[in-house]
Amino acid sequence: MTISNDGPVPQAVPKATILGGSELHKKPAWWKEATVYQIYPASFCDSNGDGVGDIQGIKSKIPYLRSLGVDVVWLSPIYRSPQRDMGYDISDYRDIHPPYGTLDDWRDLKAELKATGIKIIMDLVVNHTSDEHEWFVESRSSKLSDKRSWYYWQPPKYDEDGNRMPPNNWRSFFGAESAWEYDDATDEYYLRLFTRTQPDLNWENPKVRKAVRDIMSFWLEEGIDGFRVDAINYIAKAPGLPDAEIIEPDIPHQPAMHLYLNRSKCHDFLRELGDKVLSRYDVMTVGETPHVEEPDMAIQYVHPERREFNMIFQWEHMDVDRIPGTLLGWKQYRLSEFKAIMSKWQITMQERGGWNSLYMENHDQGRSISRFASDSPEDRCLSGKLLATFLSTLSGTLYIFQGQDIGMINLPKEWGIEEYSDVVSEMHYRQEKERRQRESKVTDPCMKDVVEDIQKKARDNGRTPMQWSGMSPHAGFTTGTPWRKVNPDYVACNAESAVTDPDSVLNYWKRLIRLRKTWKTLIYGDFEHFAAEHEQLFVYKRSLKGDKDAYVFMNFSDAPIYGVSTIVPEFEGDLVLGNYGTPRDDDVVKSTDTLRPWEARLYCARTEWKDYR
Ligand code: GLC
Ligand code: CA
């Protein structure tokens, strides 16, 4: 069976009989081999001293991105927006948020990126708009507006005592408040699954879908290379918007995710975008799909025959340290659970023809070193490299979030709750306070445990300014006052010193990114996992016909592990990369028997080792 399948497929033959899951998975594509770098514009680089990152700032860092070796830049939203949710609330899809620059600045940025061989993808946020978008302004103005049905409007309900109530009992996604917002102007409620400034678009309305297609075409015609599609599994709501079952009787607003997440209609809408717009371009798409926690569900979005997305951001691994039912409640994760999740995604996507996205950080997450390894001064660098080894040796498209490249960590533990200004942090704090009051728990007035959870998991952690320099004020991010305080550890952790230090996390990433460009096993290879139950050790093999096998040995703990060689007895290989430094002579032949704390070792198997010397 051949790998390429570019010719026309006879109608009567289902494609699946031509390429099975594994062949589909291995079918080469540029976006499978790409390393994507996510830029969060407000915090990347400020060129004019107003304290907010901007497009000129991004342009000035193109040489840095190039030397890192990334293939694609993903820009988090840079569109015109009142910034109530950091640009994920768009008021004009065809214009740039003025503090970031103009559309012409963006065009220059795109041209310069492309000239250096870097592609660009944009964030597409179309489950909702800002309440300041002209569509919504018109929609809310009158029940007779021709944009009224572009959003979900419903009259109030009233209880026996005549109190006004929202049209149904759905809880908003970001907290225990109603998903509906009352609007005086027309005495009706609108649906907003996120914040009150993010009204949900009504995708049932064909005009809305056409408007979304037009926005996509606008940017595709500008020459972009794809989209990261925000909160896209929310777009289809249950017909009739019925009440959710009462699960928490003490609260009026109930979890209702099953009534608006991953509904089959969602796939119809996405296929329409695929067929009418995306199929006309050679672009990549990655859908952000919170609460997709089963590969079966993911396959419906990413199987090539479904013509929806190339891949999604599944969330299962990011939730291993979250207490279910809370927004940011933190629990110590178990490595065996984490490994089981990762292996499941690796193996199922490969068997079923899907494709993974590999990520451990983005603007919605705490820093991975602080969550999944150790951010203590002595361990952070090893930890950063350990996690880099892990992500870069899996099958999927690799995503690096700004700052992850230099091993940035969470905000300092001494910083109080006032430094956490993100809506989700505020919501979690409020929700936990109310929960305690309801349950009449004796509450520590400082809510220390809640603050500690927020410190671990808050989205704020990923949003502090990028640390460019250890010598300049505010880490060289701005000459003015930064919109968010810079993490004071920039003195030790910054790009400038990382570039020159051969042992930096940054230079380690560079090696891994380079390896992925030539060692196709890392991209397309099958995955085999050893010692699944082990709580400190993560070991796997990657193999691809015609290429050298890769073996990865990692110690996810601060204690040494002995007897490692018994885990994969037949193994022999050469050390390609390890986070304890460059290979030594005695590393060359057999696997190590001991793994030092947080150690990661990537080997190339000696399949023909006798001929090797
Ligand atoms: C996505 C974004 C997040 C935003 C939310 C609402 O999850 O990544 O930052 O708050 O959607 O748009
Ligand atoms: Ca600026």
Image: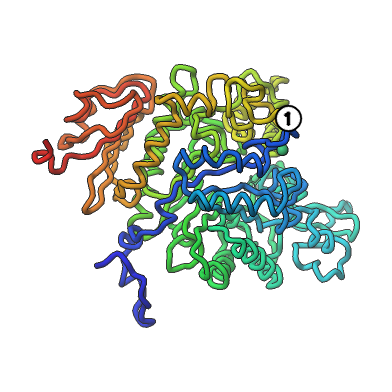
Residue at (29, 64) in percent of width and height: 3
Q: What residue type is disc 1 on?
A: Gln
Residue placed at 30% from the left, 36% from the top?
Answer: 552
Q: Taking 12 as reference, is 237 above or below it?
A: above
Q: Is any atom of residue 170 visible in this view?
A: no
Query: Dot 1, how many residues are within 10 Å of its Cα: few (below 14), some (14-19), or many (20+)?
Result: few
The image quarter in which residue 185 lies? bottom right
- Is 489 placed left or right of 9 in the picture? right
In the foreground, 564 or 214: 214
Q: Which residue is mark 1?
A: 437
Query: Percent position (x, y) of residue 415?
Result: 66, 21
Q: Residue at x 57, y 49 (%)?
A: 112
Residue 201 at least partly seen: yes
* Percent of width and height locating residue 395: 37, 48
Side of 310 where 557 appears, left or right: left
Q: Is residue 556 above or below residue 520?
A: above
Q: In the rendered image of this protein, does residue 306 appear above or below residue 364?
A: below
* Residue 544 horizontal/vertical position (percent): 25, 51
Ligand 1 under 8 Å from disc 1 Cβ: no
Quadrant the C terminus occupies:
top left
Residue in the foreground of this view, choosing between 52 and 12: 52
